[in-house]
Amino acid sequence: MTQHWDVIIIGAGTVGLPAAVFASGRCDNVLLLDAAPEIGGTLHLSGGQMSAAGTRLQKERGIKDSAALHFEDVIRISKNTVDRDLVRLAIDNAAATLDWLETIGFQPLPAHPVKGQDHEPYSVQRYVWGKDMGKSILAVLKPQLEKVTEQERVTLKLNTRVSRLIQDDDGTVSGVVASTENGPEQNFSARSVVIAAGGFAANPAMYQDLSKQPAYADYSYPFCIGDGLTLGLDAGGVSRGHENVLTSFGSVMQSYDIPSKVRCDLNHWPERRLPWEIYVNAHGKRFIREDEPSVDVREHCLQGQPDARYWAVFDAVTLKEAPSLLAGHTAGEIKAAAVNNEPMFYTADTITELAEKAGLPSGALMDTVAAFNDGQAKSTDSFGRSHMPRPINQGPFYSVRAQGISVSGAVGLMVNQDLQIIRNDGSPVPGLYAAGEALGSGATMGSSVCGGMLVTPALTFGRMLGQHILPLD
Ligand SMILES: Cc1cc2nc3c(=O)[nH]c(=O)nc-3n(C[C@H](O)[C@H](O)[C@H](O)COP(=O)(O)OP(=O)(O)OC[C@H]3O[C@@H](n4cnc5c(N)ncnc54)[C@H](O)[C@@H]3O)c2cc1C
């Protein structure tokens, strides 16, 4: 039996929650479907870092900012690789989203907004997150959804995965086919359907296919397996963003499996800890000045190395005297991990043995260490590094392997300014909308990690779809 709805939203996550809440202000017949057993999607894992210009908070703190300046920063950081129109739409409407979140109880950390953390900084303090990261956002969205489900304006069906869109002969999307696990397929018809089903980073095969590199990390929301992209493409949509694939500058993985969980992060930010180690690639060669100040430069440099991977190499004195290389690990713990042959940790009495244990070419590593030590003695470095407190010459020697990883997929569906999925010729697929990571991270971040430019556009587009874009009146 087919049930009819004003709008069906596929995914009760970052996009889907505000979309449903705002749509319910204009109609009382919203169906929100999620494959997972709970709402929230990637907000359960996300840093929840958001960027918006011209917010109430900024004004209260006397910070001068504008959407034009935010746009300029995104273009600078991404080197103009984003979808400019979409970014402008997101940025022009971001402050209203942040202001709304605060109205419903979201509290940024006390010292916020800031210019940035972990990623390339903005020129102005416009970056915020809550104490529980993405969960701080979910905590304020959840009661909003509960209110409208209690009022029966929104019907929420969990454990319900959409497998197909229903299309009329002229291509108009008029509903979805969904089912619970082992349950029968059910048809739901609607005037509009919103794809808010997230990205594909939890689908290793799809990630490999679209990104041309393995999904190294098991770090994404397990239900984000690319259904949104598949549904949109099957309906006539087109994908883009293959060229925007970028990994982080390195995490230490728990195991050699691909994908693997992340054990910890390597503290590679020179503004927090100047490097004492050298970083070498699979050829045993350095590829960057380790104190390179731009995280964006570091990330792009690593992207060009074999398997987006490098080894930090250091000696016993550095282990003892330097601040810890690894987040949450003391020197003693690093030593113990290496001595116990835990994955990614290596130690040996000589550089040659270290290379063998770490799977690096020993001759090349010997030459690299010798060249670095020579430069250190002369206070010059072939890569222009300025922080070289000591040579690497006191055994035992150590190495920790770091892996570039992605938590989101760069590729996604093309949409127009009304967030309608468009075909190759630019015409919209009638009745079909999309937002969030289903558009690909490249749409709003380009080939960069541009602070807050996934969560904020996802929330903003969800809000806008519900508030005025969807034809509900
Ligand atoms: C560890 C991590 C940290 C991050 N940190 C940040 C950050 O600090 N700032 C930032 O801007 N971005 C960050 N991101 C990215 C950002 O959080 C996501 O891009 C964004 O939350 C995605 O929102 P979404 O609504 O598109 O997807 P989601 O919030 O994941 O929602 C998608 C929903 O769709 C459901 N679904 C999937 N398929 C189906 C189907 N077939 N039928 C029904 N339901 C389905 C899923 O269960 C899920 O609930 C981070 C991501 C990760 C993984």
Image (spheres, rainbow, N blue to C red):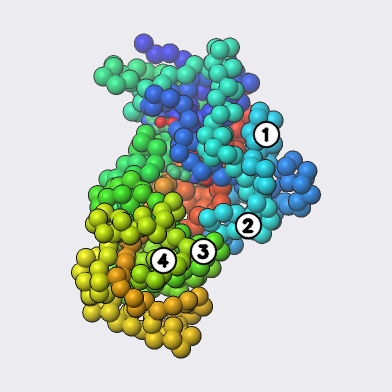
Of mark 1 and mark 2, the one earlier in the sequence is 1
Q: Position of residue 40 (x, y in %)?
A: 48, 30
Of mark 1 and mark 4, the one earlier in the sequence is 1
Q: How many C-alpha atoms fall within 10 Å of the one at disc 3: few (<14), some, or many (≥20)?
A: some
Q: Quadrant of the N terminus?
A: top left
Residue at 36% across, 84% down: 371
* Residue lying furthest bottom: 378
Name the residue carrying label 1.
Answer: 102
Q: Secondary structure at mark 4?
A: helix
Q: Secondary structure at mark 1?
A: helix
Q: Is residue 295 left or right of residue 218?
A: right
Amino acid bearing label 4: Lys
Question: Is residue 135 placed above or below 84 in the rendered structure?
Answer: above
Label annotation for residue 273: 3
Q: How many C-alpha atoms fall within 10 Å of the one at disc 2: few (<14), some, or many (≥20)?
A: many
Name the residue carrying label 2.
Answer: 122
Of mark 4 and mark 2, the one earlier in the sequence is 2
**Is label 4 in contact with label 2 (beta carbons under 8 Å)?**
no
Which one is closest to the eye, mark 2 or mark 3? 3
